[in-house]
Amino acid sequence: WSSDVCSSDLQKWMIELEEERRVNDAKILELMAKAEQESANAQTEQQYAQVAVVNTEIAHMRAQSDVLNRRIDNLLRAIEIRSNHHIGVKSLEQKAVKGVTE
């Protein structure tokens, strides 16, 4: 992490990723409903082909969702590592101050 990336920036990025995931998940549900409706009403080859197109879109959106989940998980791990690093540095600083005052 560079020193110019602060906790509020990380939190903002996390919120943006979670919102993107929420929108993506809503699109998946919408496409699933569309595919189900089109499948129930399909009577021609062209209509069944359209259902296949919608199912392909669903697969693509699910892949995007997986990528978003991995990005969110990686960001959470990075935030945890950063937090642990700051805790460790503070602990060392406190020990150094105790050593000087003793």
Image (cartoon, helix red, strand yellow):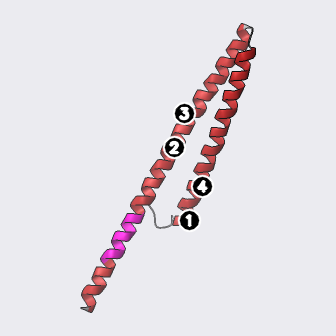
Mark 4 neighbour density, 10 Å: few (under 14) some (14–19) many (20 or more): few
Q: CA distance from mark 2 to mark 1?
A: 20 Å
Which one is earlier in the sequence, the residue at label 4 or at label 3? 4
Q: Residue at x 72, y 16 (%)?
A: 40
Which disc is residue 15 wearing?
4
Frontmost of labels 2 and 1 is 2
Which one is earlier in the sequence, the residue at label 3 or at label 1? 1
Q: Residue at x 41, y 62 (%)?
A: 82
Which one is earlier in the sequence, the residue at label 2 or at label 1? 1
* Amino acid type indicated by mark 3: Ala
User: Taking 71 as reference, is 98 above or below it?
Assistant: below
Secondary structure of residue under mark 1: helix
User: Taking 41 as reference, is 96 above or below it?
Assistant: below
Question: Where is mark 1, residue-wise?
Answer: 8
Which one is earlier in the sequence, the residue at label 1 or at label 4? 1
Q: CA distance from mark 4 to mark 3?
A: 20 Å
* Amino acid type indicated by mark 1: Ser
Question: Where is mark 2, residue-wise?
Answer: 69
Q: Which residues are magenta?
A: 83-92
Question: Where is mark 3, residue-wise?
Answer: 63
Which one is earlier in the sequence, the residue at label 4 or at label 2? 4
Q: Residue at x 68, y 14 (%)?
A: 49
Judging depth in this view, the residue of 37 and 70 nearest the camera is 37
Secondary structure of residue under mark 3: helix
Residue 24 is covered by the magenta coloring: no
Q: CA distance from mark 3 to mark 2?
A: 10 Å
